[in-house]
Image (cartoon, coloured by chain):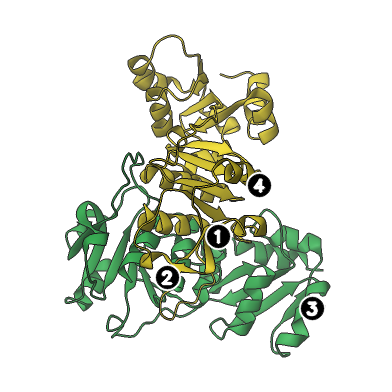
Chain colours: A yellow, B green
Amino acid sequence: MLSKNRIKYLRSLKLKKFRQKYNNFTVEGEKIVSEILQSSNVEIETIIATSTWKTQYFNQTFGKSILYEEAVENDLKKITNFSSPSSVFLVGKKMSADWEDDIFKSNFSLYLDGIQDPGNFGTILRIADWYGIPYVFCSGKCADLYNPKVIQSSMGAFLRVKVIPLDFEILATRYPNVPFYGTVLDGKNIFKINEYEKGVIVIGNEGKGISSTILEQLTHRIFIPKGKNGGAESLNAAVATGIVCSVML
Amino acid sequence: MLSKNRIKYLRSLKLKKFRQKYNNFTVEGEKIVSEILQSSNVEIETIIATSTWKTQYFNQTFGKSILYEEAVENDLKKITNFSSPSSVFLVGKKMSADWEDDIFKSNFSLYLDGIQDPGNFGTILRIADWYGIPYVFCSGKCADLYNPKVIQSSMGAFLRVKVIPLDFEILATRYPNVPFYGTVLDGKNIFKINEYEKGVIVIGNEGKGISSTILEQLTHRIFIPKGKNGGAESLNAAVATGIVCSVML
């Protein structure tokens, strides 16, 4: 059973300011925890889990060096970020956000210009993971990578795709010869372009699209064609990212 | 100001069983309500809104036949389905779910085989709307179309795309000569198929994919190719729908 103070601390990590203070984050669920245990990308602070979980998973997969705290269901209920708790709750240290300079030699990257919905952010990381995009840059207006909903909807992608918070200006200045693609209403049909040089695909905010200062710096304005009799004004940001990646990569 | 009883009634509509009992649903937000006011597809039961909203929108757009109930911000806070209330809350009658028999002459349809996340369901309707798909069939295991999160994430698409709850068997029996497409791991690369005959695109459940009985009845097994070095096991159901539609339609 967890102490009151311990529960208070774990609950505080729901908030970005405490995740920043302690430089850590939380994940829940057997599948993602077992992925983390097999990955070398996350330094684990502690694992809080039921004894059933421990019996089934703890000894098999890793040594003594990881702190395990036994919890009852009611503890997990108190600390969960979701509507129903899982049998395991992990606290990990935030990951580094460095990148190699020659990333555009053989890869595309994404630049998220203010993706605010955590579900969209995580889903976009999952897309990047599916397409083997190693780096996703994001503006300061994006949701927090370590928001539990981002982590959850990324389905483990946050372990493989590096997310780099960075001003667009810095990226554009550092890579003056790299193409910057962005979807706009008067762009060129993505299906009518034969080859795409490796570069950055800019994904705009859910409501406002790509911001005007970034729009000016796009080298390629592209467009996802609408269907005959199509009615919607736009596509969801993650769906648009998926379509663009499927065609460009 | 709304009475206690009125608030109780409006709050009850959060639950599917009460939406079923009263055969209605709720929507919130200026944009979607103004879309409904301009659409002939929804019979409006009542509009609950602030006096500011009324002054700005009520007289301009429609006549006296619609019931308007004035509410203060605190009322709207009590009845909202979201974390922050909008200035307007509408109760509408559920729409009919009939369809024309010759739908596959000139259109594709989607069949949702248990899309349980309301955000995914709404996002898929938005995709159908973008691509001009007039009918989306869904199994009994799907989220409720009138779940407020489905309505919200559809971004108005539920007004234009008809959603038909229907057993797959009925659809397959009724249209024995129509192709049924579904994404599977060992399917044919969607980019390597030159032409797609109009038919039904089956979208599987978020966790389990397409159910085995439906898998057996697919006439075309297709596949979204993964990127080089791609890590994710799968794509989000709505993202996969978007990619498939962008290529097939």
Mark 3: secondary structure: helix
Do circles 1 and 2 both sit on a common chain?
Answer: yes
- Would you place residue B196 above or below residue A218 in this image? below
Please determine whether, in this image, residue B148 is positioned above or below residue B162. Answer: above
Real-space CA distance between mark 2 and mark 3, rounded to the nearest whole angstrom: 32 Å
- Using the image, tell me which numbered label, if any, was put on residue A141: 4
Q: Residue at x 36, y 14 (%)?
A: A59
Q: Quadrant of residue A144?
A: top right
Q: Amino acid at mark 1?
A: Lys
What residue sits right under mark 1 in the picture? B149
Of badges 4 and 2, the one in the foreground is: 4
Which mark, residue B56? 3
Tell me, yes or no, whether the two marked residues, 2 and 3, touch with CB atoms within 8 Å: no
Left or right: where does residue B89 sit relative to residue A249?
right
Q: Marks 1 and 2: which is nearer the front?
A: 2
Q: Which element is circle 1 on?
A: helix
Q: Secondary structure at mark 4?
A: loop
The residue most toward the front is: A177
Amino acid on which disc 3 is placed? Gln
Amino acid at circle 2? Ala
Q: Chain of mark 3?
A: B
Q: Residue A15: image x %, image y %? A: 67, 35
Note whether B213 is above or below A18 in the view shown: below
Residue at horizontal 33 percent and vertical 65 percent from the top: B247
Is disc 1 surrounded by few (<14), some (14 to 19) or many (20+) residues within 10 Å? many
Categorize mark 4 by other alpha carbons within 10 Å: few (<14), some (14-19), many (20+).
few
Work out whether disc 4 and disc 2 sit on a shared chain. no
Q: Rounded to the nearest whole Å, what is the CA distance between mark 4 and mark 2?
A: 29 Å
Look at the image and tell me in which quarter the N terminus of chain A lies.
Answer: top right
Q: Give the residue pinned by disc 2.
A: B128
User: At label 4, which amino acid type do we have?
Assistant: Lys
The residue located at (72%, 70%) in the rendering is B88
